[in-house]
Amino acid sequence: MTSSSLSRKRQHVVDTAYLLFKRDGFHATGVDRIIAEAGIAKMTMYRHFPAKDELIVAVLEHRAARFERQLDRLAATADTAAAKIATILDWHERWFRDADFHGCLFAHALAEFGDPDHPVFKAAVRQKNGLRARMRFILEKELPPERAEEAAAALLMLIEGATLMAQMGEAATAIANARRTASAILADARVPQ
């Protein structure tokens, strides 16, 4: 088997596991189910992922990278910090309205793997910290670093809360309130202290 076909097989396993994990959860989805859904041999699974936790981390890393690429494309369409933050909320609004929306895979990972030393927990934290760092970097173009950090932390909490509300079936309210609150956070961050 060529390295290209091995890579395709590995990605197929990651894609299959992603769909199952986001719908049914990490612990509720067994390796045998992933193997069956992916239509692969058990040996193929264990060649790529000797442990289920390794597969979960790979799924989270793949999802995080895809999210980053999507946000990069959106951010390229905006000029100001406020407009770039708005593109992040635009992405979330589309996601909340998607028929296949099941809440945040990373938040689910944090809930299911509560040990801060667990590799799955660490992968989820990396994604959340990555989003906060992205927003801080955007805001540092127009704000002092400490104000940018405070605003980015508040925006992350806002997005996490909006995501939970959307999961509760209140997507329209969640995104409308998130947009208003994000504007207030940004306006407050610009007020000289």
Image (cartoon, helix red, strand yellow):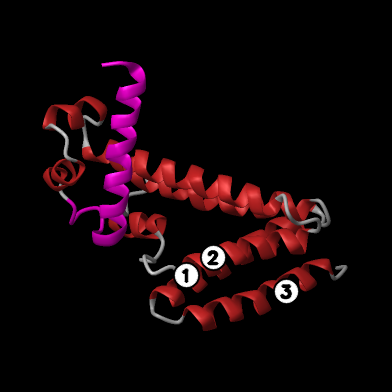
Amino acid beneath label 3? Ser
Whether tag 2 and tag 1 are in contact, CB under 8 A, the answer is yes
Q: Position of residue 116 (x, y in %)?
A: 37, 48
Which type of secondary structure does the marked residue at label 2 adopt? Answer: helix
Q: Measuring from the top left, give residue 109's x and y in whole percent.
A: 34, 54
On residue 92, the disc is 2
Q: Label 2 amino acid?
A: His
- Report helix, strand or loop for mark 1: helix
* Residue 106, horizontal then vertical, whole percent: 40, 55
Q: How many numbered badges does the structure rendering display?
A: 3
Residue 96's mark?
1
Q: Tell me which label, 3 or 1, sits earlier in the chain.
A: 1
What's the distance in space between the residues labelled 3 and 1, CA to CA?
A: 20 Å
Label 1: few (<14), some (14–19) or many (≥20) C-alpha neighbours in 10 Å: many
Going by the image, does 79 lie left or right of 25?
A: right
Q: Is residue 129 magenta?
A: no
Q: Residue 139 got which mark?
A: none
State the predominant SS element of the stretch in magenta: helix
Q: Nearer the viewer, residue 119 or 81?
A: 81
Magenta residues, start to end: 1-29
* Residue receiving disc 3: 183
Quarter occupied by residue 177: bottom right
